[in-house]
Image (spheres, grey):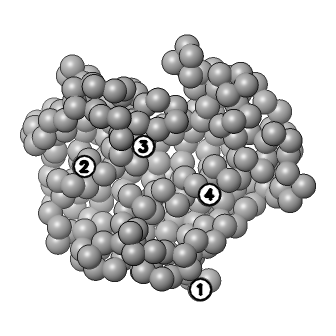
Amino acid sequence: MPIDSNFTSVLSKDFEINFTQCLPSGNLKYTELCNLLQLTAATHSEIGGISFSDMQEFDQAWVLSRMRVEIRDLPKWKDTVTVKTWINSLENSRSVRALEMYVNGKKMVGCETFWAVFNTKKRRPELLTLIHDHFELFPDLKATEESFSKIEINPEKEEVFSKTVILSDLDIVNHVNNVKYLEWCMDLVDENIILKQKIKSFEMNFMKELSLRDQVMIHENVSDDSIVFSITKEDKNCFALQLNLG
């Protein structure tokens, strides 16, 4: 797909929040928040000629490696949100993308994401084949106060849930979608923490992909100001989520 005539290195996209995306409180679900961020990143890739369809000509796709989301407030039902995105860095097989979410000009969410180019046949990272130097980079324009990091997984973690990967967990790359990991863990969080918006930021680390019928275990470690979930397959860490509470 050629570069769109309306391509710009900074993209803004509007969404209206509908009731299916909301918690009982009327606020946007954390999983739906991540979906909107991912949809905006995908749109920017499409108009810039580096979308999933473009990359599949070379058996490539972007996969999420790390993500940090900082939340000032959650949008509500019927809000029109504006998601803005740009790229901090893009070289070889890696890219750092920034995203922000606004309601009526007020910043609600900042997000920093780390993506890797993945060969969908060889199932391993590799260099990006497509031309991408038309993207202007903004290395100093940050969307978050802190950058993404490596989550420390406490060996004293508690096993809290086991799961088998099913078809609805998979995405177009044929592995568990990043939002599904978040959903699995959020289902285990005390509802008052979620409904009272005590989560001020969260980070996700994606380490190994999961496929159909994989057997996984979800672990939890709780401290005064955070909750860390980890997901393992055959005792090897595949994913980590850290919820920072306030």
Task: State left or right for residue 91 relative to residue 136.
Answer: left
For marks 2 and 4, give the CA distance: 24 Å
Where is residue 20? Give x, y as percent. Answer: 38, 69
Work out which quarter of the rendered image holds the C terminus and state it.
bottom left
What residue sits right under mark 1 in the picture?
104
Q: Secondary structure at mark 4?
A: helix
Mark seen at residue 185: 2
Decide: few, some or many residues near mark 4? Use Cα within 10 Å; few <14, some 14-19, many ≥20: many
Where is residue 200? Give x, y as percent. Answer: 35, 67
Q: Secondary structure at mark 3?
A: helix
Q: Are marks 1 and 3 in contact (CB under 8 Å)?
A: no
Q: Secondary structure at mark 1?
A: loop
Work out which quarter of the rendered image holds the N terminus and state it.
top right
Residues 74 and 149: in front is 74
Specify which label sits upstream in the sequence, 2 or 3: 3
Amino acid type for the residue under numbered disc 4? Thr
Specify which label sits upstream in the sequence, 2 or 4: 4
Residues 45 and 90: in front is 45
Specify which label sits upstream in the sequence, 1 or 2: 1
At x 54%, y 58%, the residue is 37
For marks 4 and 3, give the CA distance: 15 Å
Between circles 4 and 1, the one closer to the viewer is 4
What residue sits right under mark 4 in the picture?
40
* Residue 103, quarter of picture: bottom right
Mark seen at residue 178: 3
For marks 1 and 2, give the CA distance: 31 Å
